[in-house]
Amino acid sequence: MASSLLLSRSRSRSKLGLGLGFRSLLWPRLGLGFPFSSSSSSLLDPTKLFSELSSVDPSSDPKPLPRADHEALSGVVRSFSKSPWIREQSLAIYLPSSFFPTAAKSFRSFLLPRFPLPLLPELSSHPDPHSCLLPAFLDFCLHRFPAELREFKSLTDSADLTKPHTWFPFARAMKRRVVYHCGPTNSGKTYNALQRFMEAGSGVYCSPLRLLAMEVFDRVNSLGTYCSLHTGQERKTLPFSRHAACTIEMASTDELYEVAVVDEIQMMADPTRGYAWTRALLGLKADEIHLCGDPSVFSIVKKICSETGDELEVHSYERFKPLVVEAKTLLGDLKNVRSGDCIVAFSRREIFEVKLAIERFTGHKCCVIYGALPPETRRQQARLFNDQDNEYDVLVASDAVGMGLNLNIRRVVFYSLEKYNGDKMVPVDASQVKQIAGRAGRRGSVYPDGLVTTFKLDDLDYLIECLQHPFEEVKKVGLFPFFEQVELFASQFPSVTFCDLLDKFRDNCRLDGTYFLCRHDSVRKVANMLEKVQGLSLEDRFNFCFAPVNIRDPKAMFHLLKFASHYSQNQPVGLAVGMPKGSARNDAELLDLETKHQVLSMYLWLSYHFKENTFPYVQKAETMATSIADLLGKSLAKACWKPESRSQRKKQLDEEDGDGDGDDDESNGPDEEDAHDVLRSASKGVYERPRSLIKMFQSKRQNGPSKNRRGGSKVVV
């Protein structure tokens, strides 16, 4: 249906504004011609309905429809105006979603007083009454809103994101060989792709994370292949290097390579970053493109390759050793933690509370990994955990452990299986559970056999269900416009703010059925903040809005605003970040170190996306970032305090009118009772995580013991 819709739009472009003569072509293209062909026994012909209604003068027959008939017709029209399918089909005449409610309301006022009573039974009994009304609605819009539709057509043409494979003509001129390495974690797919990468005369490795790009950079160079590193924050170009490891957003579609490796290809479906993987698949100029990922996007990749004319080859993999679920769980007691365990929690607060409890009441020492830590600190924590000759034998981590690190994990323990999505607590997605669980028992590690379990017995059923759940086939992958496309669209709105421009682009852009427009919530928030900055060009705003900033951190947002303000005044942009005197003594100071490193990282990113002289303190920023990453590692080693959120920190700063360095005199160390509460969080204590997943499976347990736990204490998945 989507393809016929796009075809109808392309064929009807020249006819729009010339009257209604093209509707005889439009209805068959929409698939509406055959089902509604009038017969001798049918009074209702959808293709002629509008012309018949237009000839009716409501004032000449003031007698209204009977109440019951009027309510029945109103119900059909009301559901018609709320139908997403009707809204989508209306795009065929360039009627955007933003104007659809207005057009539907006007159509309702037109239809109700004119609709013939003899046709109502046939409409009401029709299996799809919406399709009966659609031709009349489209004809009505063409007749009632011709000027608006011409304007919308102009906007839609300037926001056309259909056929994105045609955006890369040089890649289309090549006969590329696409190799899909398809399999679960710990199956060797990335290893085999990297072997081909190192054998090639030239190549690029595209990573989802800076951390993983750095890992590949070090590994490839250690094996004797000169490889450069290109990320948003750093450039390390080795002499004579013809290979590069880069983050996916930094992948060049201008360079020519023999082999390209795109890791975690399933992230094409990511609602925020998916466009970067789509762009790499469509635009990389490489003789061979090796895609590594799970099977979820295989059908989409196959369809795209048929459109691009590329040859597709599939290599399927199985996990080296099966993942084993320990049915006993930790029984809600962190004293059951053992060496080689990785406790996975989905909030920073939980991570530090778990670390605190384990170190206070067991003989284990914990390393910590979570997303706000810089890559250098995460690598340092990973090395500490992997080293068998020290006392750090337990890892407490967030979902950041799911990719990018080689870890000697014996058992993955999910402390919870819920996470906050920015609005509410929701169950962790099955694909993410698989990704994280698969980190246990990696090939070549000290623990080749992978174990996975939960902290609470109540979560075990959901864990097993996730691991046994088949990969869901992805229907659409992400797209986002290039700056040139946004610039073309902006010419239609010379006085609109950049934030509003993005909203208008979203409302008017045109996509085919294979793609969706990636979310840009963080971009909009930054754009809204920068509206007060004068003197920035459209391209400047576009680049500033994509800077890597935590939009929930007011301090980081303030520094970005300051950088943009100095840049707009044609002044050299300074750092304005003080170097800490030492490692953190409490959680407030740890948060401050994280923010300072993020600000420095943001400065480095901007220095590579703007003119060289405008951000002159790159070397200083690199030195400070390295030092702060080291301080963060030292801080984590001695962290023994209760965690605090950034919102709490902001409130404290507002009350103290301080500068973010923390309160030296305040005692931040927890007492024994606080830590002990975490250990018994199953039954009582100050802190208890949400239990919605328990309710989800409560009824299942009331019917008897779980079938997944019958016959032993372990389940192989």
Image (tube, grey):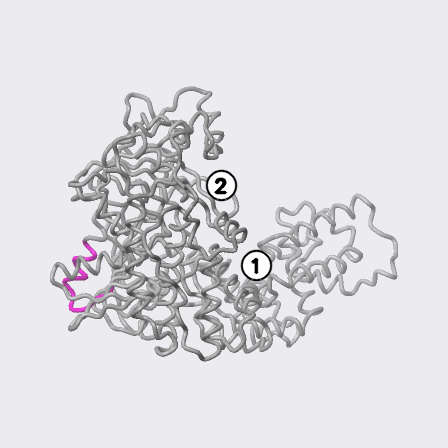
Q: Position of residue 669 (x, y in %)?
A: 38, 39
Q: Is residue 702 left or right of residue 187?
A: right
Q: Residue at x 74, y 49 (%)?
A: 73
Q: Residue at x 35, y 25 (%)?
A: 331
Q: Position of residue 286 (x, y in %)?
A: 25, 68
**Magenta region, residue range:** 192-204
Query: Of the residues shown, which amino acid type is indicated by label 2?
Result: Met
Q: Which mark is residue 104?
A: none
- Mark 2 = which residue? 425
Choose top left, top right, bottom left or bottom right for residue 447.
top left
Task: Judge whether residue 198 is colored magenta.
Answer: yes
Q: Is residue 619 left or right of residue 506?
A: left
Q: Residue furthest left?
A: 224
**Front: mark 1 or 2:** 2
Q: Position of residue 33 (x, y in %)?
A: 58, 60
Choose top left, top right, bottom left or bottom right for residue 125.
top right
- Mark 1 = which residue? 88
Would residue 259 be seen by someone viewing this image from the given angle? yes
User: Is 117 or 672 nearer to us in this picture?
Assistant: 672
Q: Position of residue 593 (x, y in %)?
A: 37, 55
User: Is 693 or 587 nearer to us in this picture?
Assistant: 587
Q: Earlier in the sequence, mark 1 or mark 2?
A: 1
Q: Main secondary structure of the magenta part?
A: helix
Secondary-structure class at tag 2: strand
Q: Tell me the quadrant of the picture where the C terminus can be found.
A: top left
